[in-house]
Image: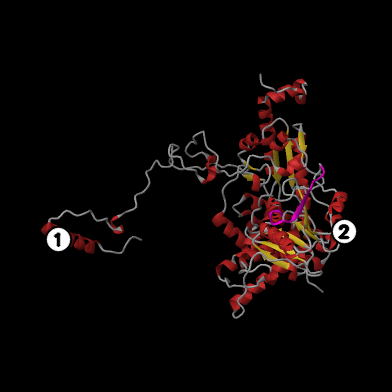
Amino acid sequence: MLSRLSGNSVRRAALRASSKSAKGARRAFVQPSGADRASVVDVPANYQDDNLFTPRPDMLGFKLDVPRREGSVLEKARPIYLDMQATTPVDPRVLDAMLPYLTDQYGNPHSRTHAYGWEAEKAVEDARKHIADLIGADPKDIVFTSGATETNNMAIKGVARFHKDKKRHIITLQTEHKCVLDSCRKLQEEGFDVTYLPVQPNGIVSLEELERTIRPDTSLVSIMTVNNETGVIQPMKEIGAIVRKHRGVYLHTDAAQAAGKIPLDVNEMNVDLMSLSGHKLYGPKGVGAAYVRRRPRVRLEPIMSGGGQERGLRSGTLPSFLAVGMGEAARIAAKEMDRDRKRIADLSDRLIQGITSQIDHVIRNGDPNGYPGCVNLSFAYVEGESLLMALKEIALSSGSACTSASLEPSYVLRALGAAEDMAHSSLRFGLGRFTTEAEVDFVVKRLVATVQKLRDMSPLWEMVQEGIDINTINWSQH
Amino acid sequence: MVVPPSKHAVLSLYASMLRTSRSFSSYNFREYFLRRTKSTFREIQQNEQDPAKVSALYNDAVKEHAVLKRSAIVNQLYGGWKLVVEDQKPERTRGVN
């Protein structure tokens, strides 16, 4: 571990040095001792006490104010996870499919000359086929990327820049994902014209308005299939029919939240570009896929320049284990889709019934016929952050993970027309394949107790109980 | 003519799959695979009269059992913190007052 100098050689060197200094008797600076003189000292026995405050992994960022007793059983209890729209756990079967490509079969799929490359390439092509089968496409249409964000960037910027000579208009919605909105904003800076369509209060875009907005110089319409914050499902077949009537307009959809959860078919939906994400499908993080239609060919300017892999659209070595993981996740999702849909619908009904039967003034944001695994509820007269902090044993989010750092209420809820205070007190419950009834019951019990406790403390709630209408109060200061 | 698997084979596969599912350390995966095993074998039982279907389901289950055994081992190596919703069994230490 430490240097392999024997004790003897050190002593000899020290003697030599000391004999020289004895003769010359000159004062010199102290030489730094070598690494062999150092020894690891163990941390003091009482290091884990509360006085020395370092965040432990099981604290999850929350500050403890009650010192835990020694041997307390709750030291290592993890919260239950109900945030499936942020990310999903990797299915153990997917991990099992990925591990061979992380241990012995580590070849580069683009190596043409040896067996390591051939077997990696075969695995990647199998994964491509599984993903294509999930969305009803041809395997040659699928391009692996590093995630849905990269695919959204590639699709929007790529199509817009390729057609920039003749077509300068892009249409998208106000409730899209941050990466789509940011790409459009970047294109606006480059001189493109972007229309952000509003949505109806239930979250669905108005088809007449979309039809009216399409101009002769529109190149791209980008609408996400299932919204990540409210679970609203857009009518993609009707939108596809409208876009098909106008030649030269491409339809891009961000199906990261939809793939594997609701049945998708790119030919029925008449979609030209689709974004998929691995970690929303019970696969690994860091991989995604793009569907780029070949008949009629969609031309786009690639973002990544390099060796021309993936039809020239996304150069770079394919992470074979990630691609295999995403392919296996897609295969399992296609097989389990009916079972999962039925089960998640049952769990979602159980959650909503449990909450609304015990507390009132609860509003569901978004269309009730949206995806049942994403339930976004607003609790009136309760502050959102305090609700989240009180529910420490449940991993939940209010609004999307991308915007959770800022204090602003979610722009999606604002686009749906929710009042500012309701937008602040919204919670998003994400149910998935691995959620159990016991977890849902636990959540309902905790939530009801917390909301009642917070409301009892709230003077606004007292006023509402007395029958005073909050909107008629004049809050001016004297 | 497809020969369906014998009742004994199906039952022993069921028992070993249940044992493997119960050995997962993570609560969510354990509950999911238990539920899924029971539902798969309920489907086999419902289709008793159709030997081709029973064979197909049985062969799929055999393959899945192999995958599940390896996944259970990996999960035991890396998983296993107790969730708040599980029964918290207090650790009993010997020789401490």
Q: From where the camera sits, is residue B64 visible? A: no
Label disc, if present, on residue A241 of the rendered structure: 2
Using the numbered discs, state the Cα–Cα distance from disc 1 to disc 2 in whole angstroms.
Answer: 93 Å
Please check the rendered image and state whether residue A14 is part of the magenta-colored stretch, yes or no.
Answer: no
Q: Is residue A386 above or below residue A296?
A: above
Is A390 in front, or is B74? Answer: A390
Q: Quadrant of residue A165?
A: bottom right
Residue drawn at (67%, 26%), measured in percent from left and top?
A458
The kind of residue tagged 2 is Ala
Mark 1 secondary-structure assignment:
helix
Residue at the far top: name it: A478
Q: Nearer the viewer, residue A470 or A114?
A: A470
Above or below, B9 against A415 in this view is: below
Chain to which mark 1 belongs:
A
Identify residue type, mark 1: Lys
Res A239 seen here: yes
Of callouts 1 and 2, the N-terminal one: 1
- The reply to whether callout 1 and callout 2 are in contact (CB within 8 Å) is no
Image spot of residue B78 (x, y percent): 55, 55
- Residue A20's label in the rendered image is 1
Where does the magenta region start and end?
A188-200
Quadrant (top left, top right, bottom left, bottom right) of the N terminus of chain A:
bottom left
Residue A365 lies in quadrant: top right
- Which of the chains bears the disc numbered 2? A
